[in-house]
Image: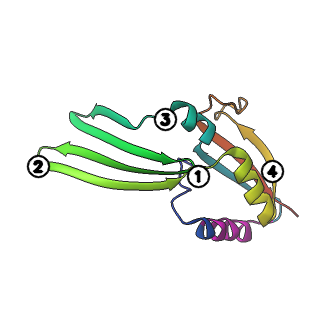
Amino acid sequence: MWMSFGYFEDSEERLVLKKVFDALKPGGRFLMELLNRAFLIRNFAARDEKVVDGIKVIEEREFDILTSRVRGTITRHEKSGPIVKQTFWRIYSAHELKNLLEGIGFSFTAAYGNLQREPLSLETRLMRLVFEKRC
């Protein structure tokens, strides 16, 4: 949940998913909540600026269409000075994750646009994908 996947190299991510598969009992379910690549492409912003709890936060990012990776910089302008954090993560499409997890041994169960189980669409920001370990 909360986009906790996509931060490793592709081969490492496959290993992480394999370990999840191995940890589940037959029939066990795995829920992934991730940024929807289709939504990101349609709504990509190279720069965002906002104030959070009185602190100015600037996010600058670039999207590599060939690798589906976003590289960014988040700058928080604290009273003590700016704090800068670099980000780098892989954005997946629903079909890429479906193919990846089915290749590991999961069966695809469902895709939702929110926690109320509305359908996944191009307008879905965070997609929820459900997989099950085959018996």
Residue type marked 4 = Phe
Q: Which mark is residue 109?
A: none
**Majority secondary structure of the magenta segment?**
helix
Residue 28 in view here: no
* Disc 1 versus disc 2: nearer the observer: 1
* Disc 4 versus disc 1: nearer the observer: 1
The answer for how far apart the CA atoms under marks 2 and 4 are is 48 Å
The residue tagged with tag 2: helix, strand or loop? loop
Q: Is mark 3 in CB contact (under 8 Å) with mark 2?
A: no
The residue at the far front in this view is 66
Left or right of 41 in this view: 133: right
Residue drawn at 64 percent across, 40 percent down: 127
Residue labelled with disc 3: 44
Question: Which callout, 2 or 4, points at the residue further toward the start of the chain?
Answer: 2
Residue 129 colored magenta?
A: no
Image location (x, y in percent) of residue 65: 56, 47
The answer for how far apart the CA atoms under marks 3 and 1 are is 15 Å
Image location (x, y in percent) of residue 29: 75, 55
Residue labelled with disc 4: 108
The residue tagged with tag 1: helix, strand or loop? loop
Q: Residues within 10 Å of mark 3 (few under 14, many from 20)?
A: few
Residue labelled with disc 1: 66
Image location (x, y in percent) of residue 88: 44, 56
Residue type marked 2 = Ser
Res 78 quadrant in image: top left
Question: Which callout, 4 or 1, points at the residue further toward the start of the chain?
Answer: 1
Q: Which residues are magenta?
A: 13-25
